[in-house]
């Protein structure tokens, strides 16, 4: 018998014995409970980590709206990394290359952010970029940008 088939047969025997009321050895029950507890704890840790990341990004976006330096720039390149799921979510990760003028010198900024596909600027458009004064590499496209 193949290993996968024998494993399935073992699981079927375990399930049938549990349904029939046959008791499993205590160490098998303890091992099963330990595995379930570890999986539950890992799920809780991953969920908390995800929520903390969402809150940090939300806080940073609000801080950037309040303290960010708005700069006008010209869009040189615009591309979506992946196509969004149509009908589910119209946002996708994007890469935007923007040329901005700051203090008389020209800089090229590469913006990587999730953007609404309908609001994706076209190459050559003038866009507003919010620059983080503490970390200039973390610039973002201003949310007030609209394609009229």
Image (tube, rainbow, N blue to C red):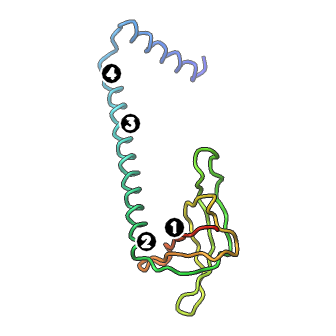
Q: Is residue 27 left or right of residue 137?
A: left
Q: Quadrant of the N terminus?
A: top right
* Disc sitting over residue 143 in the figure: 1
Q: Residue at x 52, y 69 (%)?
A: 144
What label does residue 37 carry, if any? none
* Crowding at mark 4 (Cα within 10 Å: few <14, some 14-19, many 20+): few
- For image coordinates 29% across by 19% down, the residue present is 26
First in sequence: mark 4 vs mark 3: 4
Q: Secondary structure at mark 4?
A: helix
Residue position for label 3: 39
Residue 114, compared with residue 122, is above or below; it is above
On screen, 36 above or below 116?
above
Looking at the image, is mark 3 or mark 2 earlier in the sequence? 3
Of residues 131 and 108, which is closer to you in this image? 131
Separation of marks 3 and 2 at Cα, in angstroms:
39 Å
Residue beneath label 4, please? Answer: 29
Which-is-in-front pick, marks 4 and 1? Answer: 1
Name the image quarter holding residue 66. Answer: bottom left
Instruction: Answer with mark 4 or mark 2, whichever residue precedes in sequence.
Output: 4
Q: Disc 4 to disc 3, how far (Cα)?
A: 15 Å
């Amino acid at each position: 018998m193949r290993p996968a088939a024998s494993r399935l047969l073992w699981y079927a025997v375990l399930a049938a014995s549990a349904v029939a009321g046959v008791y499993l050895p205590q160490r098998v029950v303890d091992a099963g409970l330990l595995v379930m507890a570890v999986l539950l704890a890992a799920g809780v840790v991953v969920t908390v980590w995800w929520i903390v990341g969402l809150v940090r990004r939300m806080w940073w976006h609000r801080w950037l709206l309040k303290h960010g330096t708005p700069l006008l720039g010209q869009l040189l390149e615009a591309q979506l990394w992946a196509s969004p799921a149509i009908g589910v979510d119209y946002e996708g990760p994007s890469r935007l290359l923007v040329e901005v003028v700051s203090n008389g010198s020209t800089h090229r900024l590469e913006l990587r952010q999730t953007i609404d596909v309908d609001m994706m600027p076209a190459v050559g458009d003038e866009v507003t970029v919010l620059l983080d004064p503490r970390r200039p590499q973390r610039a973002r496209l201003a949310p007030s940008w609209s394609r009229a």
